[in-house]
Image (spheres, rainbow, N blue to C red):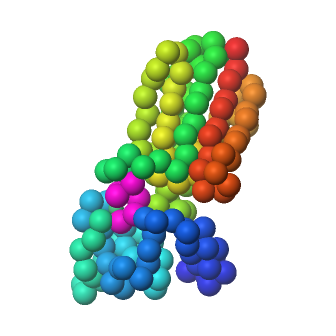
Amino acid sequence: MANNRKDKLLKEYIHDPYFTKEKYHDPSVCQQCGVVFHDGIFQWMEKAPTNAQKIICPACRRINDKYEGGIVHLKGEFLQNHKDEIMNLIKNTADEEMAYRPLERIIEIKEENGEIIITTTYEHIARRIGEAVHRAYKGSLNMQYPEGQKYIRVFWQRD
Ligand SMILES: [Zn+2]
């Protein structure tokens, strides 16, 4: 992995209570999802190094605790009529983001009062989902960071 990308990825998680890299042996492998902590960063590997210690990664711990770093609210009549294709776009976007940033995951997708609500482990993936839906289907997109850069609320609506 290129060093500048690695530095950038490290910086993004440095203040995360779930990403305390000094706690992890290098290499380590997550027993729940298989992501590998190696060279100081979480990454997907074909095969974990044989000396890897077994851990639960920060993303899986957030999923287990339902400790979200982002939330996406989708609503409006257009959503009701295009739910399947919008859900497909969301899943594809999440897969792409997770391939690049292994700790970015969807925690839960639920429907409430005609809204689709998606919680995510970190803020990047929530923002990416909002931007992807907005790019594909227009409508209105609003993003708020109520606690600085560490948490995001994304609202998308098309009537
Ligand atoms: Zn994991």
Residue 52: give x, y in percent of width and height.
27, 82
Residue 125: give x, y in percent of width and height.
57, 50
Viewed as shown, does residue 37 lie left or right of 32? right
97 vs 88: above or below: below
Residue 16: give x, y in percent of width and height.
51, 65
| Region of the chain picked out in magenta, as a range | 57-62
- Residue at x 51% of width, y 26% of height: 116
Viewed as shown, does residue 88 lie left or right of 26? right
* Pick the front one: 21 or 43: 21
* Pick the front one: 85 or 10: 10
Q: Would residue 60 be counted in the magenta stretch?
A: yes
- Residue at x 25% of width, y 65% of height: 31
- Residue at x 50% of width, y 56% of height: 104
125 vs 112: above or below: below
Residue 58: give x, y in percent of width and height.
40, 63
Kindly report the secondary structure that dominates the magenta region of the rendered protein.
helix
Could one spot residue 112 in this view of the protein? Answer: yes
89 vs 48: above or below: above
Q: Would residue 154 be counted in the magenta stretch?
A: no
Total label count? 0
Residue reaching furthest to the front: 147
Could one spot residue 127 in this view of the protein? Answer: no
- Residue at x 68% of width, y 55% of height: 148
Ligand 1 sits in quadrant: bottom left
Viewed as shown, does residue 27 lie left or right of 121? left
Locate the N terminus by quadrant: bottom right
Locate the C terminus by quadrant: top right
